[in-house]
Image: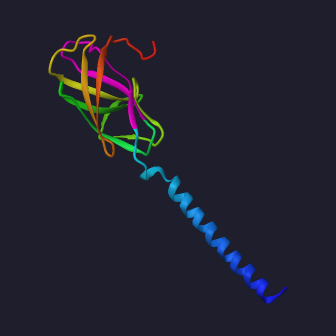
Amino acid sequence: MSRGFRRSALIGAGLATALAAGTVVVACQSSGSSSAAPKLSVADPYIPLPATPGGMGAGYLTVRNDGGPDRLLKVSSPGAGSVTMHRSTEKSMEEVGELEVPAHGTLDLARGGNHLMIMEWSKQPALGDELELDLEFAKAGTVVVKVPVKPLTYRPGS
């Protein structure tokens, strides 16, 4: 082998290694979805009619995310004095400060799991009423949802 050929081969191998390393770094940066903006939508919101007049109500909905991760920080309503986020387990129900909305996933607020508790209604809810819920997310900001009051036994898709 000539000295010139060997030198060219070494330079070419070095360039190929550098380009490959750069490609790996770029691929790792672009696959990290933590910097991607969340793309949120809300589906199937409903509030079962409270069993007792003036009583607490529960709120259910699904937050769909077609982007990066986010967190639901707070829920409020002009039609209620208090809306809190809760998590149910087999033995208890506990208030939580925030709920994760995974990247390219869903946050389900459903019976028997994460849900909202609505208290101090400004007017007694009736079937067909809608309650405005203002969902405050860490990255996406506030999403306003009109949530219909359904029969106590209502189940989405039924």
Which secondary structure is most common in the magenta stretch? strand
Q: In the figure, is residue 121 to the left or right of 104?
A: left
140 versus 56 height, above or below: below
Res 144 quadrant in image: top left
**Picture colour scheme:** rainbow
Closest to the observer, 144 or 19: 19
* Relative image position of residue 20 (x, y in whole percent): 63, 66
Q: Which residues are magenta?
A: 40-64
* Relative image position of residue 129 (x, y in whole percent): 25, 14
Res 12 quadrant in image: bottom right
Residue drawn at point x = 62 percent, y = 69 percent: 19
Quadrant of the image containing the N terminus: bottom right
* Relative image position of residue 18 (x, y in whole percent): 62, 72
Q: Residue furthest bottom?
A: 3
66 versus 8 height, above or below: above
Q: Is residue 52 magenta?
A: yes
Residue drawn at point x = 44 percent, y = 51 percent: 34
Q: In the figure, is residue 124 to the left or right of 137?
A: left
